Every structure is written in structure tokens, then in C-alpha cells.
């Protein structure tokens, strides 16, 4: 079994190559071709919801694959748009719905909505990234979490953005060695704890983000993939509960990679 750390490095080192490989998958290539050939024909919310292949493609591209079944819910989001402060999408805590309504903003742009780059190439690019993350997650959930965090890091403005997203929070909990039980505490206290342990601005720097995700994948391996974690080969008889300091583990992992 390849470690999470190694798998993530192999994918992220040349992300475009990984995306190209995903795009060449016969099923993905077929659905992408259908989408690009037909999305321009969609002139209304009804048109989009009426073509299940196009609708499913768009939903997956927006990270909403698990909500494909909820057409009534999505119809309300799209028919109200985003221009009104009281629009349904603007009142939902999950930002994915507002992003979806922004991309397919029939309320504002009407029949020309699907002529824009964001609804065509932009949606295809998002679909490929979502597909890559999903397929990686089938083999190793830790890799999917790392890829997701890498994609969303630029959007993180404060600790509350992390707390509002279960996947981002899981990455931070592992990387900062925060007990899962802390998620049951006061929200302000959780935010303060994250701020104390993590410089969120450092995530905007590619090198800072790389270091953070190296820490996450190393500790994910220690917690979940003990037998495959490269750092663990430096020891014998070690277990995740051995109490080794997280910074020490990361330093040992860097030595293993020849970073020093």
C-alpha cells in the first residue's frame, strides 16, 4: 500500500498531468464531450433540469453530486438567483449553492447564461478536478482531503471558514493534532484554538500550503496507514498512540525524503 503522503505527492507534483489522465478516462471523456456539445442549447432552468446528463455533470462539477436527486431544492436556488439579499442561495450556509447559482445565473443573464466560459470550460475544469479527487478518495480518503484542501485554501479567510466546512476541519484537526472532541466545544473557542496553532495567511503561500499538507499527509499516515507510512520504517514496534511529537514526525519524514 502506497502511503497517503507519497500518493498525494505523485498527484500534486504535476497536477495538470493528473487531470489530463483523468480526462482521458472513457466515461469522463464521453460525458465531457456531451456536456460541451449540448450545454449551449440550454436556455433556462427548465432546460438544465430537463437534461439529466447535463444537470448531473454540472452538479458534480460544483461538488454537489450527493444532491443530484433534490431537483426541487436546486430549482428554487436557480430560480431565485443571487441578486436579492433574501435569495435562497444567499441564505444557505453552504457556499456551494451560491457558487452553483452564480455559474448558472439564469435570473440575471437568461438565455445567454450558458455561453459564458464559466459555464462551459470552467465547469468542465471543475468536473475534472472533482473527478480526480473522487477517484483518489476511492483509493485513499486522505489524498482526497489533501487535494480538496489544496483547492479551497485560497478561499479560506478565517478560522470560521474552516469550521464551516467538515472536510477542511478534518484536515486541520489532523495536521494540528486537535482531538476530534474539540469540535463539540464552543465555536469561538474552537476558532481561537485554530488561530493559535495555524497562521491562516501562510496557506496563501504555495510553499506554506505545501508544508501544511506535508504535515497533514504524514500524520494521516501515522493515524490511518501505519504499515505504509515511510516515516514509520525508521522505527520498530511503533504505534499511532506512541506519543511521538507531530513536529518530530514531520522532520523525520523530511529526512526520509532527503529534504535536509
Image (cartoon, helix red, strand yellow):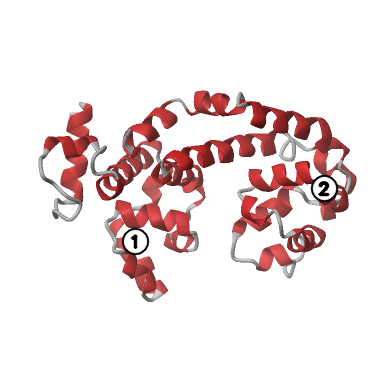
Between 230 and 44, the one lying in front of the other is 230
Q: Earlier in the sequence, mark 1 or mark 2?
A: 2
Could you classify mark 1 by the number of other residues whose Cα lies within 10 Å: few (under 14), some (14-19), or many (20 or more)?
some
In the rendered structure, the answer to whether residue 134 lies left or right of residue 114 reads: left
Is residue 259 visible in this depiction of the protein?
Answer: no
Residue at (58%, 38%) from the top-left corner? 131
Report which residue position mark 2 lands on: 48
x and y percent of residue 155 in the render? 52, 50
Give SS at disc 2.
helix
Q: Residue at the far bottom: name it.
A: 186
x and y percent of residue 192 in the render? 34, 67
Examine the image and state in which quarter residue 206 appears: top left
Between 208 and 62, the one lying in front of the other is 62
Between 200 and 137, the one lying in front of the other is 137
Report which residue position mark 1 lands on: 195
In the rendered structure, the answer to whether residue 153 lies left or right of residue 181 reads: right
How many numbered marks appear? 2
Residue at (78%, 57%) from the top-left corner? 78
x and y percent of residue 110 in the render? 88, 49
Examine the image and state in which quarter residue 225 appears: top left
The label number, if any, that marks residue 254 in the structure image: none
Residue at (38%, 52%) from the top-left corner? 171
Residue at (72%, 47%) from the top-left corner? 103
Amino acid at each position: 500500500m502506497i502511503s497517503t503522503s507519497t500518493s498525494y505527492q505523485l498527484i500534486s507534483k504535476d497536477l495538470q498531468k493528473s487531470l489530463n489522465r483523468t480526462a482521458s478516462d472513457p466515461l469522463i471523456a464521453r460525458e465531457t464531450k456531451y456536456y460541451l456539445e449540448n450545454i449551449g442549447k440550454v436556455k433556462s432552468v427548465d432546460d438544465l433540469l430537463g437534461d439529466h446528463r447535463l444537470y448531473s455533470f454540472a452538479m458534480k462539477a460544483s461538488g454537489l453530486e450527493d444532491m443530484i436527486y433534490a431537483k426541487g431544492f436546486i430549482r428554487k436556488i436557480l430560480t431565485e438567483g443571487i441578486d436579492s439579499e433574501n435569495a435562497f442561495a444567499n441564505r444557505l450556509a453552504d457556499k456551494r449553492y451560491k457558487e452553483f447559482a452564480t455559474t448558472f445565473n439564469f435570473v440575471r443573464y437568461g438565455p445567454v447564461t450558458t455561453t459564458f466560459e464559466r459555464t462551459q470550460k470552467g465547469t468542465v475544469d471543475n468536473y475534472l478536478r472533482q473527478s480526480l479527487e473522487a477517484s483518489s478518495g476511492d483509493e485513499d480518503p486522505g489524498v482526497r482531503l489533501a487535494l480538496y484542501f489544496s483547492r479551497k485554501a485560497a478561499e479560506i479567510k478565517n478560522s470560521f471558514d474552516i469550521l464551516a466546512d467538515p472536510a477542511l476541519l478534518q484536515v486541520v484537526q489532523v495536521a494540528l493534532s486537535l482531538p476530534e472532541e474539540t469540535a463539540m466545544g464552543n465555536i469561538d473557542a474552537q476558532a481561537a484554538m485554530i488561530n493559535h496553532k495555524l497562521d491562516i495567511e501562510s496557506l496563501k503561500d504555495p510553499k506554506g500550503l505545501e508544508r501544511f499538507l506535508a504535515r497533514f499527509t504524514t500524520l494521516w499516515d501515522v493515524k490511518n496507514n501505519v504499515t505504509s507510512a515511510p516515516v514509520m520504517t525508521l522505527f520498530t514496534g511503533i504505534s499511532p498512540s506512541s506519543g511521538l511529537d507531530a513536529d518530530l514526525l514531520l522532520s523525520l519524514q523530511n529526512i526520509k525524503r532527503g529534504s535536509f
